[in-house]
Image: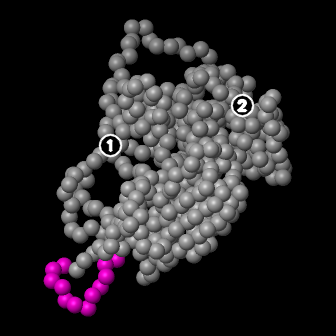
Amino acid sequence: MADDDVTALRAFRAGLFVCCTRRRDALLEVLDAVLTAGAVPSLPHLSLAPGHRRGWGSVYAALRRGHISFEALRSLLLRQPMPDGPPLYAVDVSVWPRPGAATSPERGYQYHSPRRRDGRDPVVPGWAYQWLTRLSWDRDSWTAPVDVRRVRPEEKPTDLAVEQLKTLVATRPAAQRGEVPLVLFDAGYDAGGFTHALADTPVALLIRLRSNRHFWFAPVRTTAHPRGRPKRHGAKFVCDDPATWPAPTAELHAADEAYGRVRVRAWTGLHTYVRRPVRPGVVGQYRGPRRLTHGTVVRLEVGRLPGRRRTPDVVWLWWQPPPEPGCEPGSPSPADLDRLWRGYCRRADLEQTFRFLKQTLRWVTPRVRLPEQADRWTWLVIAAYTQLRLARGAVADHRRPGERPLPPARLTPARVHRSFATLAWCLPPVAAAPNPCGRSPGRPKGRRSAPAARYPPRKKAA
C-alpha cells in the first residue's frame, strides 16, 4: 500500500512539473516549502525552509511572473485516485478577505466574514473562490478538490457552478463516465437556475433550501372551458406551514448509530419559476412567461448530531435527478432517499477542508496585490493538499502528547502534513537547482516608483 502511494505521489509531481509552463522551478520549490515548512506568517518565510534553495524574492516573483496551466492541472487532479463509492461532489464558496488592500483590483464587497466580532460591519471586501470537491461517503476528514474558480463581482455563483459542472462531465476520465455524480449545494444557490442550464448534463443536484421557501403543485385540469389563460400553478406548498403539506410521495424511516432516528419525507411534482430579466442588472423588469423548474422537495430530520449536544435543525432540500429526455422526474425510491440524506451529511467535510487550508497551509495568509497571483497561489495550495492526500498511507503517525494513535488509513490532514517532511527527502527533486546570477544592481539612482493605482471594492450586480 505504501509503495503504491509513493508511486502515485511521484507521478503526480511529475505531471505537476508539466503543468507549470513559466518559472516552474521557482513555483515547485515554493510548493515543497509549503509542504515542509509548517505554519509560516508570510510568503518570505517560505524561503527559509530547508528545501528552498532560492532567495526570498523568488517567491513573489514566481507568483507574479510564473504561469500555471489550470486546464492541465484540473485534468491531472481528476486522474488521481478518488474515494470509493458513487461520485459525490460539493460546491461551495470560500472568501479570501482583503479589506485593506486598496491597490488590489476585482475585489467584491458583499462577502460575509465571521471574524468581525468587534461591532463593525461583517461584510468585508475580498476575493471569493468557488470550490468543486469530491467527497467520501465515509466519516472522513479528507476531500479531493478538483476545481476552483474565482467569482468576480459581476458573476453569479450559480452560473459559475453550471460552467464547473459542465467542465467536470466533459473532462472526467472514461472510467468515471458511467456513473451520475450527485452534487451538493448550500442555501445560497438558486435551485431554479440549474434546470435549463444543465438540461443535457447528466448530474443530480441536491440543494439546501431556506425554511420559508414556497412552491406549487401542478394545476388540476378540468373538462370545462374556463375563461382566460389556463392556470400554471396549483396548490401552494410552504415549507414552514405544515397545513399546506399533503401526504408525502415517498418516506423513509431509519436508525443510524451516529445520527439516531432519521426521518426523510419527499414531495414530488412541485415546481418553482425562473425569472428572465430584460437586461442584465435591471431589477424589476422581466419579459415573457416565467419558465417553470420541476423537482422534489425533501425534508430531513435527524435525532442528534455526532459529537454535539444541541438539537439539530430540520433541513429542507431540493432534489433534481439527472435529466431524461421526454420524461418527467419520478418519485424517489427508498434507496434514493437513503442516498440523499447520507450524502448531504457529508457536505460539512468541505468546511473542514477550508479550515485546514486556511489555518495550516495558509491559503489566505499571503498579501498579494493582483488577483492573478491569488489564483496561482490557490492552485499551488490545491496541489499541496493533493500530495498530502496521496501520501497518507506512506507516512508514519507523529502524534503529539495527548493525541490518540490512529491507523495509517485514518490519519488526519494535519498529522500527514506534520510527517510529510520525512517523506520529502525520499522523493526525487522536481525543480532544477538555481543558477547563481550575482548581486542585483537594484533600483537606478534617482528613479522613483509612481503611486500604485487604487481600486475601490465593487458591489455585486443586482
Q: What x and y, as percent, mark residue 368? A: 48, 28
Q: Residue 340 is drawn in which quadrant?
A: bottom right
Q: What's the amino acid at mark 1?
A: Lys
Tell how many labels: 2
Q: Is residue 225 left or right of residue 30?
A: left
> Could you tell me which secondary element the residue under label 1 belongs to?
loop
* Residue range corresponding to the magenta coloring: 218-229
Residue at image x 38%, y 66%?
Answer: 243
Q: Which mark is residue 36?
A: 2
Residue depth check, mark 1 versus mark 2: number of the one nearer the observer: 1
> Could you tell me which secondary element the residue under label 2 belongs to?
helix
Q: Nearer the viewer, residue 95 or 168?
A: 95
| Residue 177 drawn in magenta | no
Q: Which mark is residue 460?
A: 1
Residue at image x 46%, y 63%?
Answer: 318
Q: What x and y, as percent, mark residue 165? A: 49, 60
| Mark 2, other Cα within 10 Å: few <14 / some 14–19 / many ≥20 | many
Q: Residue furthest top?
A: 446
| Mark 1, other Cα within 10 Å: few <14 / some 14–19 / many ≥20 | some
From this view, report whether residue 37 is shown above or below residue 388. above
From this view, report whether residue 433 is shown above or below residue 191. above
From this view, report whether residue 424 is shown above or below residue 438. below
The disc, 1 or 2, on the residue closer to the chain's N-terminal end is: 2
Q: Is residue 2 left or right of residue 445?
A: right
From this view, report whether residue 34 is shown above or below residue 349. above
